Image (tube, coloured by chain):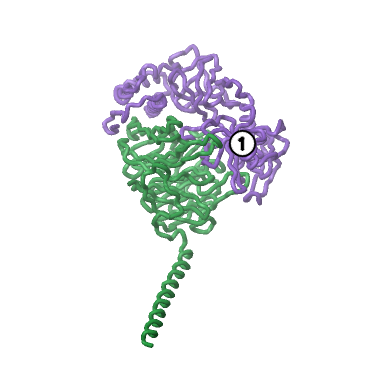
Chain colours: A purple, B green
Amino acid sequence: MGVSTSGECNLPTRVRTPAYRNLLLMHDLDLLSSLAHRLPGSAARTGGRAMMRSWLALGLLAGCMGDVGAVDQPLDPGALFDQTDESDSPETIPIDEEETGDPPLAYALVGHKARVTAQSGLHLRTGPSTSYAIILTMPDGAEVNVIGVSGGWNKVTYAGRTGWASATYLHTEAPTGAGGTAVDAAIMRAQSGVRFSYHWGGGCWDPGSTAYGACYGNCPNCTHAGRWGADCSGYLAKVWQVPGSIALTTCSHPYSTYNFRYTRAHWSPVARSSARRGDALVHHENGAGHIFLFESGDGWGWMRAYEAKGCSYGIQHDTRMASRNYIAIRRNGF
Amino acid sequence: MRRLLLALGGLALVALAALLLGGRSRALARRAPRATPAARAPAALAPAIAAPGRGASPASAAVALRGAWGARPGEFGRRRDPESNPEAPMALAAGAPGELAVLDQVNRRVQRYRGGRLLAILEVGGDTAADLALGPEGRTVVLDRLADRTVQVYDPSGKLLSALPLVGPGVDEGGDTTGVFADDEGVYVERQHGSSVRVADVNGNADPNRPELLGRPSRDGRLLVQAEIAHRAAGECLLRATDRPSGRLAWVQRLRAGQPIVHILMLDSDRRGNVYLAADVGSENGADFAIVDERVVVARFGLDGTPSGRLELPPWPAAEETLRPMAVDDEGGVLVMVPQEGGLQVLRYLFP
């Protein structure tokens, strides 16, 4: 069993799953990152960064990581630090989110493959921001598996390693027949509604406007101020463009949560365990209901959602739990 | 004649006894509703609570507190507006046995209890708070991640000490955050059930550096813990503990739930350093995709990662969203919020 006081890390069990290896890999990369940041003078930002990381790596691999070698595919110490960075490759400067202030228009599809679209390569980092250490640089055209998303960053696996890369430079290869473009467009519509107010019975907003509106009280006896806003079902219908194409600025509310839950006009139920980006989770019981757009899942099986949450909240992008009362539905053609 | 008198006397005695007993019962029945829910001492498991699911281990539980839906002291707010997200208390936090707090965000407050009695009510600014933590010296920390996007620190009297901006280095979006934590070292917010960001010191002063931690801090201060689903269909979760002082991996363990994982519900610890992981498990019915055979598996791991117990509890029973439906107190009691038609119960389960 593990011993925390001696500095040794004995694995409690012999584990064979890739997820376990990724966990260990991520842990030690995170660890190296955190240790590097604690160094005096912030050595991680100097030209000696690679050397410092190598020292840390050797020290760790001699101790904790030595036991990691007990897993089926021992980690190659050198492989952890073969990244290209400022000191390693002065001729090419791999891009990253640092070179652009533009947020990605659409994230890569979680659960699918994507390709790097950056001529000078793209950093794979230990976390979803530039403050995290660089694991390596992925070349232009490299194929990655997208396994998560966090605010403009994708969690990906590449060459057996797991890390984070700017979603701006990852191009999703839409699965055959899955209508990736339509899903991307739906996500973009959902993003464009964030910050607008909750408007009971409403379903319109102007992405170019900052007149978000406001809601007061408890609906349906609530008061709405402003022109734009939506409730949960009005928002979802507009994001999904059901029953048909309609401008976001044209106010409409064609379906309620009852319709989404119990009818199959332009959608069908799917297994929650197979829910994918662009699906919706809906519940309706005893006259009350809610629906939200599913973007991705996190490590706990919670959901990244776009939703017109309620009067006090407005339209939000958040991580949430959905109880068994919710079922998953998929728009026809997604 | 004498027999007749004796018989009549006996009947009179029986009637008198019945009258007295009945009267006492009625008196008890009248008295019961007068007792405020918050003032009620923990009692035996209420019969309304569903029995643990299939294959469950025996789990003893007591009602830690109970309150009706409403806005009076000791009651809890519930919001079930049509076409919006249903809400009941989003979170609870526990300290010493009997000491717990419920985030009653619909009523814009935190209610703190000791021994089942309502101890204090803290007014919080809005009705959109999502999580809370009990800090040292009686402080309460509240996370409003979506509307105000602040971390609020209150002193024991309910005075707001600070309201820190949530979004900043390490937190790009308020909706990314999945919990708030407080200990002797500071105040932290967790991002997408992964790493945590220290946002303030123990007094609520903002930390400009906002360093990251490899997980959420354990109550004894020795570990940082993280969990994730390793294999949903196979019912496996991984739990990783980092030795906090050294930053080195302490141990990795797995929870085999025996059924597909729906989601993880809790990762917490007690004062002795035991770590608790709870996963909601269930199978999807192929016909209508309903989740069936649902239950919550709670596993306990010792300071060195040794598995030391397992409970099986009823699942979260309602559509209401929750961020922290379960918590562990200092002594290892597992507290679970149970929203019901009449109100909210908090049950305390003990490992056998």
Classify residue A326 by image quadrant.
Answer: top right
Is B130 positioned to the left or the right of A266 in the image?
Answer: left
The answer to whether residue B196 is visible is yes
Residue drawn 67% across the image and 35% down it: A265
- Residue pushed farthest bottom? B1
- Write down the chain letter for disc 1: A
Q: How many marks?
A: 1
What residue is shown at x 44% (from left), y 44% (from top)?
B204
Residue in the image at 50% along x and 28% along y: A148
Say whether residue B209 is visible: no
Indicate left or right for B152 with B9 as reference.
Answer: right
Q: Quadrant of residue A279?
A: top right
Q: Residue furthest left?
A: A6
Task: Please state the horizontal and vertical placement of residue A185, each as a whole percent of the image.
Answer: 64, 27
Relative to B211, is A140 on the left or the right? right
Of the pair A89 and B280, the residue shown nearer to us: B280
Q: Nearer the viewer, residue B8 or B131?
A: B8
The correct choice, above or below, for A228 with respect to A217 in the image is: above
Q: Is residue B334 left or right of residue A114?
A: left
- Quadrant showing the N terminus of chain B: bottom left
Q: Residues within 10 Å of mark 1 (few under 14, many from 20)?
A: some
User: Label 1 amino acid?
Assistant: Val
Q: Estimate the x, y position of residue A197 in percent, counting from the top left.
A: 64, 42
